[in-house]
Image (cartoon, helix red, strand yellow):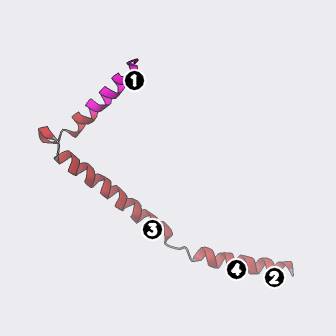
Amino acid sequence: MPYRTMGWIHANLARIAHGQSGQGTVEYVGLMLLLAGLLTGVVIAAKGMKDGGGLATEIAKKLKDTIQSIGVKK
């Protein structure tokens, strides 16, 4: 009797697990859409900056300001 019960449990778990096939693909597509949206935002932000979109210059300037502000005691 216990073997029959264990077989029944195994069969039902296998059926439930099999119903989730393709889930990884959905998550992968969602991640790709998120990255595409993020990169689109970066491109739009870079076009709006002066000096031909000096995004690297702006990032470096913000990092320098942040690093210098850490050492300043108020």
Q: Residue at 85% of width from left, 78% of height from top? A: 2
Mark 2 or mark 4, earlier in chain: 2
Which amino acid, by three-letter code, is at mark 3? Thr
Q: Residue furthest front?
A: 74
Magenta stretch: residue 15 in it? no
Residue at the disc numbered 2? 4
The numbered mark at residue 25 is 3
Mark 2 → mark 3, Cα distance in angstroms: 35 Å
Within 10 Å of the Cα at label 4, are there few (<14), some (14-19), or many (20+) other Cα atoms? few
* x, y percent for residue 25: 45, 68
Relative to 61, residue 22 above or below: below
Q: Nearer the viewer, mark 2 or mark 1?
A: 1
Mark 1 or mark 3, earlier in chain: 3
Q: Main secondary structure of the magenta part?
A: helix
Which amino acid, by three-letter code, is at mark 4? Ala
Residue at the disc numbered 4? 11
Whether the residues at callouts 3 and 4 have beta carbons within 8 Å, the answer is no
Q: Is residue 59 left or right of residue 34?
A: left
